[in-house]
Amino acid sequence: MGDYFSDSKCIPFIVEKDGIIQEVNDAFIMLTGFDKDELKSNHIRSVWQSLFRNNTGFNFINTEEEIILFTKSLEVRFVTVSKTEDIKKSETTYRFIEKPNSGLENKLPFVEKLIQDGKFGMAIYTARDFTLLKANQMYLNYIPKSFNTKELAYGKRVTELFPNFKNSHGERELRRVVKSNETLYLTELKGLWCGSDDRYWDNTIAPIVEDGEVKYVISLLYDVTERVLSREHARLKKEQIETILNSVSDIICIVDKYGNYVSGNEFSKKLFDLYKENLNSVEKCFKIFDCDEKELDLKEFDFGQVLKGKEIEKVRINIELNGEVKCFKLSGKPIFDKNHEVANGVFVLQDITEEIKRIKKIEQQNRELLQSYKKIELQKNELNTIFQNMSDGLFVVDKDGKIIKRNKAFKEVSRKLFNDKNVLNHVNEAIDYGWKHYDESGRELLKEDLPIRKVLKGEFVKEQRIMSVKETRKTYVDFSCTPIFDKNGNFQYGIVLGHDVTGKIEKENKIKEQQDLLYKSEKSKREILEKALIMKDEFISLISHEFKTPLNVIYSAIQLIEYMYSNKLPERVNELIKSIKQNTFRQLRLVNNLLDITRLKSGRLKLKMKNNDIVLLTKMIVESVRLYVEQKNIKLFFKTNVDSKIIAVDEEKYERILLNLLSNAIKFTSDGGEITVNIKEDKLLNTVAISVIDTGIGIPKEKHKLIFERFGQVESSLSRQAEGTGIGLSLVKLLVDALEGTINLKSELDIGSTFEVILPVKEYMENEENELCLDADTRLINAINVEFSDIYF
Ligand code: ADP
């Protein structure tokens, strides 16, 4: 105990009673650097807090246990603590035995030195529980704010200093260092220890061994954010520049001072390699020409100039690559280093092939334009000549009605119409000059209806005839106007063409007047003639009637004589009677024909249409005249291409037609001749043609028309010979017309004539059967007698 007390002066201790510090010795003050007053009468817990700087309670049972104690100036001391209790006084004494060289500054002088250096953040932790023993301010600055001073941070475990450190990657690394006794270098780690911040760190964790075991770890921290970021920044910049280089259409390349390729955009490298390859080779696939198409020596090419420090700007070159020629503008710039020597050359090749092509095209177009301009100029001159020399007046007005161009003819017209005003400047001068204007129907025109006003409104005018009247003067002009629009459809000019037709109209009017007069006199003449014709027809009709009655009486008397007295009369008388009878028939025929013609002409002759077999009917008529024909020693033939054909026809009229033709054929055919009646059905035209063909004297061509006219005979001597009157064929024609048929003639002199009657095939709808059989026979005999009365047998 004595030792204890004698030593007690140099062993630091403190005495505590009821939790309050009662006694502190000098050695303790020496050890900790606190004042007595700061300790005495204070609560033991606050003293422990100041000394050990954490909340761990101590029981100091294991007196050998090394404890870390912080002095007032926060220096570290390694001590063991023993505890003695005086039960009587109920006091507890705590003794602190400092380990030899217990200050860190003594233990690890190099660490101390490094910490002082402050080049990087540095801290030293215990290896056992990673309590921070010491750190420089730079390191403290890296710790979150709540612990970034010595006072706040020393004695704290790393888990307290850095939130989320527990179980983190950082903790694992730290433990690994302790375990392996190997230094760990972490570089450019994102986030300190636990990855909670955006900064980058180099962290070197080194173990420190004492008595054969790892006692401490040192952490050297360095914020490398700036370095990482600027490197990233540089990488991005490079990428941006490369993107720009590759996205421009120009070829860009950078070479070093020796002419080696440094960088550039994609195509530039290939081109540069080709250029280098071709420098010395004879077989060149890469040739350069100046803009006059003269080949340049690659070695003497401007590239070298730039590396000698000269700038070249937009030199035109043509590059032939694999047979394809492209045009470029070459620019080059040297880049100098700080000693003003060329460090790099930058070259830009701008492809202007398309531009050159375009320029050439434009030049070609310009040449063509010039040519067409010349052509237009020529045409303009031609047009102007036509314009000036045309007989019609022509002028051009602008949109305000101002006359901006006029030809000679227009000047003359305006001089005539506007009192020697040979230059009209505005259309209103003409409009307001006092002329009144009318259209073709004589309606007076408003100013708005005048062609010039219409064209100013953008309307087209086509040959509008205007009659203009002033006092006794009258003019007629045909106006044609064309508006001209600009590309937006706005009216620009009007072209007015005036064709003076006054002379023509006046002439036309005169002719019309004369024609009217002529027409009137012709008309009255024709009326007189028609009246005379009617009177004549009426007269003939009347006379014929008057003739017919006594003729019938004579004929009846002859018939009576023939029946009653013919065998009682001498032969001679009978012959005379025969002659009387024949002449009576001739007279009757003439009278009948005349009557029928006048009836047909006046429309009084009625047709009795019935369905008849035209073949049968024709054959019957032909057969009934056979006797007469053969008496004259003429052969008669009947031919047909159909056996029977029913058509609507007036039997009596048809008889008259056929008998007339047959009697003519007999009359004009001499002995030994032939007469053929031919029927031909034309199914296509739906007609039946009946031809009477003879081998007689024929009819001259010039008479073909005439014989169908009334009293039209070929030759009076001939008709005399044949005793005709020249009205038979005209009646035939009228009858054929009435049956809706046609008649035509083919004849040659001395060969014969063919009269062809074409009748339409139509059937009569009325169902009245004809009961004419007997009647028809008697009528036919009479008719033959009458029709053949001209012929002497
Ligand atoms: P005509 O009563 O005088 O016979 P037509 O009108 O029948 O009158 O005939 C007019 C004239 O046409 C005849 O006079 C004759 O000259 C001529 N002619 C008519 N038929 C024939 C014919 N078959 N051959 C020659 N001449 C004919």
Image: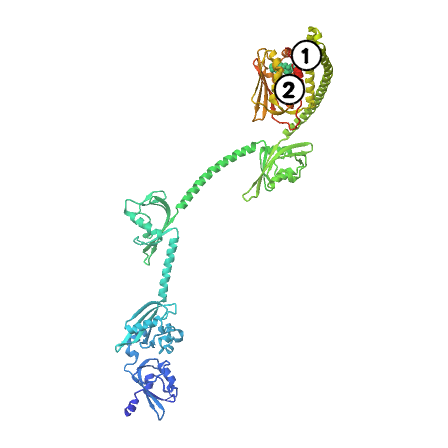
Residue at (36, 66) in percent of width and height? 226
Q: Which residue is mark 1?
A: 582
Q: Quick check: 683 above or below 489?
A: above
Looking at the rendered structure, the number of numbered marks drawn on it comes to 2
Visible in this render: residue 734? no
Q: Of residues 198 and 494, which is closer to you in this image?
A: 198
| Image coords of residue 388 (percent x, y) | 56, 33
Disc 1 crowd rating (10 Å Cα; few below 14, some 14-19, many 20+) is many
Instruction: Kindly indicate the quadrant of the structure image that contains residue 706.
Output: top right
Q: Judge from the rendering whether residue 496 lies leftward or rightward of residue 145; answer left or right.
A: right
| Image coords of residue 58 (percent x, y) | 35, 83
Q: Quick check: 298 above or below 55?
A: above
* Ligand 1 sits in quadrant: top right
Q: Quick check: 586 above or below 412?
A: above
As measured in the structure, the alpha-carbon distance from the residue carrying label 2 to the one carrying label 1 is 20 Å
Q: Quick check: 203 above or below 459?
A: below
Residue at (42, 44) in percent of width and height? 358
| Image coords of residue 408 (percent x, y) | 58, 33
- Dot placed on the residue nearer the N-terminal end, 2 or 1: 1
Q: Which residue is mark 2?
A: 655
Looking at the image, the residue that sits furthest to the bottom is: 88
Answer yes or no: do the residues labelled 2 and 1 have beta carbons within 8 Å?
no
| Image coords of residue 392 (percent x, y) | 59, 32
Q: Under tag 1, what secondary structure? A: helix
